[in-house]
Amino acid sequence: MVPPRIFVLPPEDDPVHDPCLTYAPNDFIVALPNPSSSHPLSLLNSTLQCVLALPQLNESLPAIPSSPALASFVALARLLQSEIVPPGMEWERGAPLPSPGILAPESAVDLSWWLELSGLDSTPSNALVDAPAAPIVALFDHVLSKTRFANLFHSEIVSQPAPSATPTPPPSPPSPSTLISISLATFSESAKTDIPALIARHLNVSPSFFFFGSAPPPPLKSNSLTPSKFSRLPAHLLIHLDRPQSVTTPTTLHKTQVELPLELDLSFHSLPNAARKTFYRLHGFVTQTNGHFLSYTRLRASRTWFKCDDGSVGRFDVGVRVASRGVVLVVYMREE
């Protein structure tokens, strides 16, 4: 039985106010097929499982999609979030969580439109995906940017010039961004760093080291770089860690270890009116080993973690410290 859907008209002053068709999502994460163990498909699967596990997606998709790619994503999201029910189970909200590992039918999951948008449609299944940002950018810039859901990821960063006696004209308003991309190319493969230090470096601010094991990042290229701050904080903070191909192990990506604190406070890096709240909690991340991608994520407001490895999904204890030499995508959710 397919759960009921509700037709909703967003406020007229909303940047994207197309009618939405909302639905109640499942209380579990659907496993996704990858019969050929394709590296590009493992990247798409793990990214999709991270995105579908975020709150409010089920309330933000248009009733009438404006493009073929968006129509494909909307149909897939509704299928995976609400239409796949474990065999033998009656549809009942609030029922105990089913056993993990409910696999979507291979015939129902078509990601060819996403592979084409990402430029990965001709990539061999066993090849290293050396540009993991491509599917993320394609999904948000060409698909989700046409939905209300993308508003939750919009951030704005403005430079903070030093005080000067000479009046300067106010800077032009910054363009909203959905993805913060940070390169790890200047780090050695044996280095260790963390998300707070990387964010500080991205904003041209000297980082403070609060996490055990952190190593100072390579020095900034120029001391004359102007520090920046967030003038708008997103509800969902999306960070892409750009890893080049490993020099020592060509079958994998750059192996700098990055620690992901479970909690993150951006008050120091934000202007007073950037947001009411500046405290974030780790919600999910995509990582890789020898070219194969998998994700770890919480499910909406739950504190329970899941490990998503294509057709295998199960509960997972991340412990009190998360660090990875393969993480390429990190999602933090702002605490309200």
Image (cartoon, helix red, strand yellow):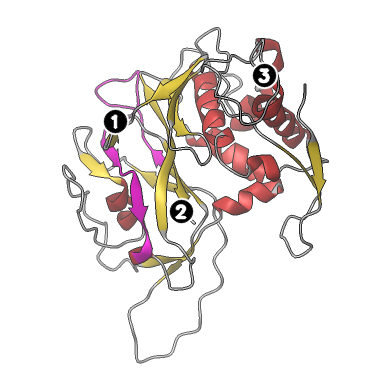
Classify 10 Å Cα crowding around label 1: few (below 14), some (14-19), many (20 and above): many
The residue at 28%/30% (across/down) is: 255
Closest to the observer: 132 or 55? 55
Residue 242 in magenta stretch? yes
Examine the rendered structure and indicate whether residue 10 appears above or below residue 120: below
Residue beneath label 2, please?
Answer: 335
Whichever of labels 2 and 3 marks the residue nearer the N terminus, that label is 3
Residue beneath label 3, please?
Answer: 85
Closest to the observer: 148 or 55? 55
Q: Provide the secondary structure element on which disc 2 rests.
A: loop
Question: Seen from this angle, which residue lies furthest top?
Answer: 36
Say which quarter of the image contains residue 215. top left
Q: Give the alpha-carbon distance from disc 1 to disc 2, as whole Å.
A: 27 Å
Residue beneath label 1, please?
Answer: 325
| Span highlighted in magenta in the image | 240-267
Q: Give the alpha-carbon distance from disc 2 to disc 3, as whole Å.
A: 30 Å
